[in-house]
Amino acid sequence: MMKDIFSTKTIKTIGYEANSLTVQFFHNLQNLLPHMEWVPLSSEFHSMRRLKDEKELKLIKQAVEIADQSFHELLPRIQPGMTEKEVAVELEYLIGKNGHDGPAFGTIVASDIRAALPHATPSSNVVKNDHFLLIDFGVKYKGYMSDMTRTIWIGSPNQELQQYDRIVHKALEEAIAAIKPGRTGHEIDAVTRRVFQNEGIESYSLRGLGHGVGLAIHEHPRIVLNGEEVVEAGMVFTVEPGLYVPNKVGVRVEDIIHVTDRGCDILTKTPRHIHI
């Protein structure tokens, strides 16, 4: 099909995403179109994909809707005593049933102190009463992706854990309120960082607040400390403040937003406060 398409065109040069293509796949393309000149590109694609058009936005919204629905169906199934692996299997079954093309990345399920590991893979650790359960997952739909994190209260976590949770939610709310065209990634990141600094816990926070989402789970813009990229209408990115206190607690809450002329629309519809 690809060969047929290019045979009808006068194209002589093709740019390819050098950082993403495997050597074998690249050789297959060269063999398929041997008379083409192949030019490696990297940052050029980042710039091209920073802004999403209406078609792309619609597909991202559909990926987000599948994630929201699947997570909603998962919650009644979560019980203390389940392993993190069992929760992850249930979730991935549901997103498959609801029409996704595959997980956008490796699903993170982490209970109690394992939630303090930012990239924890599901283990045999069990979901415990009076602790947090952190779930970070994404859905791929027709090539486009979603990304969401929720920190669930199982039973009644102690007051110290609840306070960490409240601080992260405050950081998320203030960051979203600060998003508008013309601001840099650093300026938006600084909003959440001030919330953590005022509580004396900034050293436990993530070094970045968010990232673009589209055909890849990590795209531009980067909403990070010292990031000078300017926010523009049409961008789609995550807002995901997190606190990770070693051997004690991990809390992260993550939404996807779409930047508009006046601010942003929150695409994620799952409630942020969840108590089982």
Image (cartoon, rainbow, N blue to C red):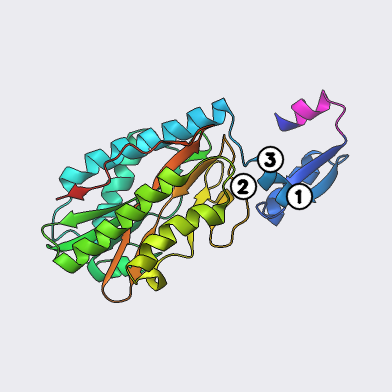
Amino acid bearing label 1: Leu
Which residue lies at the image location 54% right of the left edge and 62% below the top edge? 225
Label located before the other in sequence (2 or 3): 3
Amino acid bearing label 2: Val
Q: Mark 2: few, some, or many residues within 10 Å (few <14, many ≥20)?
A: some
Which residue lies at the image location 69% right of the left edge and 49% below the top edge? 25
Residue assigned mark 2: 230
Residue assigned mark 3: 48
Which residue lies at the image location 83% right of the left edge and 46% below the top edge? 38
Looking at the image, which is closer to me, 105 or 253? 253
Task: Please tell me whether residue 141 is drawn above or below residue 17 in the rendered image.
Answer: above
Res 202 quadrant in image = bottom left
Which residue lies at the image location 30% right of the left edge and 65% below the top edge? 250
Residue 271: image location, x then y, percent: 26, 41
Q: CA distance from mark 2 to mark 1?
A: 22 Å
Label located before the other in sequence (2 or 1): 1
Side of 255 where 234 appears, left or right: right
Side of 150 where 77 appears, left or right: left
Amino acid bearing label 3: Met
Residue 223: image location, x then y, percent: 53, 53
Mark 1 and mark 2 in contact (Cβ < 8 Å)? no
Residue assigned mark 1: 41
Looking at the image, which is closer to me, 182 or 273? 182
Label located before the other in sequence (3 or 1): 1
| Range covered by the magenta-colored residues | 3-11
The kind of secondary structure element at disc 3 is helix
Residue 212: image location, x then y, percent: 54, 47
